[in-house]
Amino acid sequence: MAKLYCTATNWGKDFFTHKDRNDFYLSGHPGDVWVVGNNPAGISWINRVGGTSKTAVEAQAIIDELTEQAKTYWDALPEAEKAPTDPDHKRPEKQTLP
């Protein structure tokens, strides 16, 4: 399935609905990046939420920049704060958009 990429700020309740999730592919990523199914319902959702269209390369660049910032922050932490007390508390890794 073809996908569209956009940025849109999630305002909370009703930013997307259960119906939206059933009508088109939708996944959220860091930097307010959204991957949306390329169908009429997906396009309508982008317009409804005031989304700004991005190419796949532009969307990936936003995520890559945030990941690099998070890695820099992580690397600067004292070793004691990097201790694995929580399995989800680890150095950020590169994410690749679908």
Image (cartoon, grey):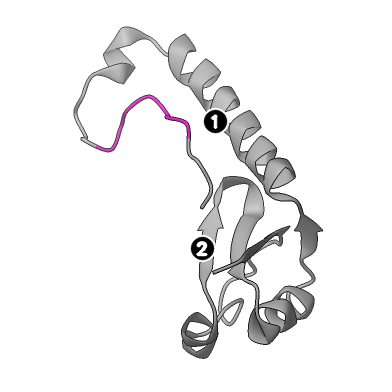
From this view, report whether residue 98 is shown above or below residue 23.
Answer: above
Specify the quadrant of the image occupied by residue 83.
Answer: top left
The type of residue carrying mark 1 is: Thr
Residue extent of the magenta highlight: 88-94
Residue 91 in magenta stretch: yes
Sequence order check, earlier mark of 2 and 1: 2
Whole-percent x, y for residue 98 in the image:
51, 53
Residue type, numbered disc 2: Ser
Judged left or right of residue 55, residue 90 is left
Q: Nearer the viewer, residue 16 or 5?
A: 5
Residue 44 located left or right of residue 18: right
At 54% from the left edge and 16% from the top edge, which residue is drawn? 72
User: Residue 14's mark?
Assistant: none
Quadrant location of the N terminus?
Answer: bottom right
Name the residue nearer the viewer: 62 or 41.
41
Residue 93: in magenta span: yes
Q: Residues within 10 Å of mark 2 (few under 14, many from 20)?
A: some
The residue located at (79%, 60%) in the rendering is 53
The answer to whether residue 89 is left or right of residue 67 is left
Q: Residues within 10 Å of mark 1 (few under 14, many from 20)?
A: some
Location of residue 24 in the rendering, given as x and y in whole percent from the top left corner: 54, 80
Tell me where residue 9 appears, x and y as whole percent: 69, 61
Write down the residue under mark 1. Answer: 67
* Front residue of this view, candidates 46 and 73: 46
Q: Position of residue 3 (x, y in %)?
A: 61, 64
Give the Cα distance between marks 2 and 1: 17 Å
**Residue carrying label 2:** 27
Quadrant of res 7: bottom right
Q: Are marks 2 and 1 in contact (CB under 8 Å)?
A: no
Q: Residue at x 75, y 81 (%)?
A: 48
Q: Nearer the viewer, mark 2 or mark 1?
A: 2
Residue 77: quadrant of the picture: top left
